[in-house]
Amino acid sequence: MNTPKHVPAPPETTGRHLSYLGFAGVVVAYLAIIKVSGMLIGGWADEDDILTTRGLVFTMLIPLGLALVFTYGVVAALGWWRPVMRDDRPVNRWVWLVPAVLLVAILLGINYSALSEKGWLFVVCLLIATQFVGWGEEGMFRGIGVTVLRRHGLREGQVALWSSLIFGAVHLSNAFTGGGAGSIAQAAIVSLAGYFFYLTRRVSGSNAVNSVTHGLFDFSLISGTVILLDQEGYLGSFAPLLAYPILAIILLVKRRSIETADHTGDIPVAPAS
């Protein structure tokens, strides 16, 4: 009698099952680590801003580092390394325009003069901290979040929509930490950015490119809008902001040619375990 060969399960069906409620709990824990540890560690160190190297370390680098460890600890516990770190749903090659536009905005938006005044140690700490943001948020929302939505059988258009909206919605938490009503506008903008990073993940086939890009984008924003040499601001800080409407218009015009002709969007559903 012939023994049937073992056929490995698709990436989306390997590892543990995570419900929507479970994912919500993971996201809340991720936010709590950043917010609570940031307040406790910053308060202990008597630091409340990121304008000095010491302040940057205690209010940003350490809390974000803890959140990063938590994110990839969850990935390891779920056994989701491959579906989180790789994306097997390609899009048309022109979508590389999305990370290209973001990269140009990053290079134009960095306030090189202000950073030079801060010194190399500050720049290195800020670069590491913003990469912690990029890898942490992309791991949580484009990695774990996208995998959760796919495993529950959502079509790819729904995955793109809901992963981006969830990403934007969690930034409403800034309303409780001094962000005020402006947090609503920020959440809408962040949702749009989430879609750009989602497309970057798909066109690159990896969660690494969008993670690095996300971190550099935040590095550019912080250097251009927070770290100022004077009160006149920095003209280049408008470059990252202009990237949003430019990409939105491009994607609106070419929305029907994002997916490849052979991509059906059918997502296998993982069995509960």
Image (tube, grey):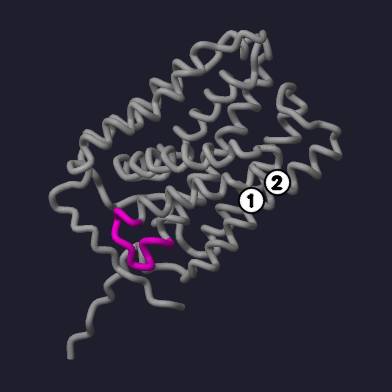
Question: Could you tell me residue 206's position as x and y percent?
Answer: 37, 44
Query: x, y (%) of residue 242?
Result: 41, 23
Residue identified by numbered label 1: 31
Q: Is residue 25 left or right of residue 151?
A: right
Amino acid on which the number 2 mark rests in the picture: Lys
Q: Are marks 1 and 2 in contact (CB under 8 Å)?
A: yes
- Residue 179 magenta: no
Q: Position of residue 78 (x, y in %)?
A: 51, 65
Q: Which residues are magenta?
A: 148-158
Q: Which mark is residue 35?
A: 2
Farthest residue in the bottom direction? 1
Q: Quadrant of residue 249?
A: top left
Q: Residue at x 59, y 12 (%)?
A: 233
Task: Specify whether 267 is left or right of 213.
Answer: left
**Which residue appears at 55% of the width and 26% of the height?**
219
Q: Secondary structure at mark 2?
A: helix
Which residue appears at 20% of the width and 40% of the height?
A: 92
Residue 41, above or below 158: above
Please say whether residue 157 is one of the residues in the magenta stretch: yes
Q: Quadrant of the N terminus?
A: bottom left
Give the residue at x 49% y 13%: 236
Callout 2: 10 Å neighbours few (<14), some, many (20+)? some
On screen, residue 216 versus residue 151, left or right, reads right
- Res 83 → quadrant: bottom left
Q: Is residue 210 above or below residue 69?
A: above
